[in-house]
Image (spheres, rainbow, N blue to C red):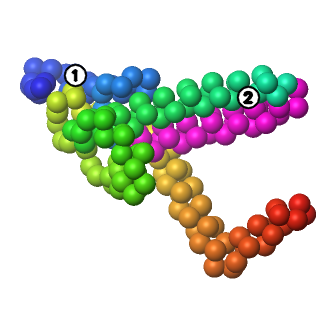
Amino acid sequence: MTELSLEKTPEEHYAYPDPLGFSGRIGRMRLLAWSLILGLIASVVALLVLLAIKVSPTLAITFGATLTIVFVVVNLRINAQRLHDLNWSAWMLLLHLVPVANLVLTLALLLMPGTPGPNKYGLPPPPNSTAVKVLAWINIVLMVLGLFILIIGLALGLQDSLINAANSNSL
């Protein structure tokens, strides 16, 4: 375990996060910011794959499958680093395969504060920049807005009309 020293500069008291590595730690805000960026990249790639299906279905499926694997690996790395910030092993990610435990783990990753100071996974992450804070809040607003739209849709019974339209192939 690394200890803080008064002889070090403030920059040496933090471990800078690596979005492409399994080691290190990230906080809640950085998890939300990186998840938003990853989600935006995945949306653009999905749109490109849908457009590429018209040109070559085989190429589009191969491209889409490859990038899906990359997306899953990067997402696992980000979540592993968040678990390290909680001083938990990355093996806890296996709980995402268990039906109710995945919801509990996701809420824990989003709501629990990280371990203050160094832990067995390294130095704490640096303070969040303004960009990280803005991206995290955009992600939170989008999640709340999506939940609000879902609740309104269920309350108004819009899901039945959409399902019926999809079954009859007409809107």
Q: In the rendered image, which quarter contains the N terminus?
A: top left
Taking the spot 43% from the left edge, 54% from the top edge, the residue there is: 99
Mark 1 and mark 2: span between their CA atoms? 45 Å
Q: Earlier in the sequence, mark 1 or mark 2?
A: 1
Residue 151 placement: quadrant: bottom right
Residue at left offset 36%, top offset 45%? 95
Q: Residue at x 40, y 50 (%)?
A: 98
Specify the segment rendered in magenta: 28-55
Say which mark, if any, is on residue 61: 2
133 sits to left or right of 138: left
Residue 49's spot in the image, x, y percent?
Answer: 75, 32
> In the image, what residue type sits under mark 2?
Ile
**Residue 157 locus on image (x, y percent):** 70, 78
Res 25 label: none
Q: Main structural element of the magenta stretch: helix, strand or loop? A: helix
Quadrant of the rendered image containing residue 62: top right
Is residue 49 in view from this perspective? yes
Say which mark, if any, is on residue 12: 1
Q: Is residue 2 above or below residue 85?
A: above
Say whether residue 32 is magenta. Answer: yes
Residue 17 shown left or right of residue 147 in the figure: left
Callout 1, which amino acid?
Glu
Q: Decide: few, some or many residues near mark 1? Use Cα within 10 Å; few <14, some 14-19, many ≥20.
A: few
Percent position (x, y) of residue 159? 71, 70
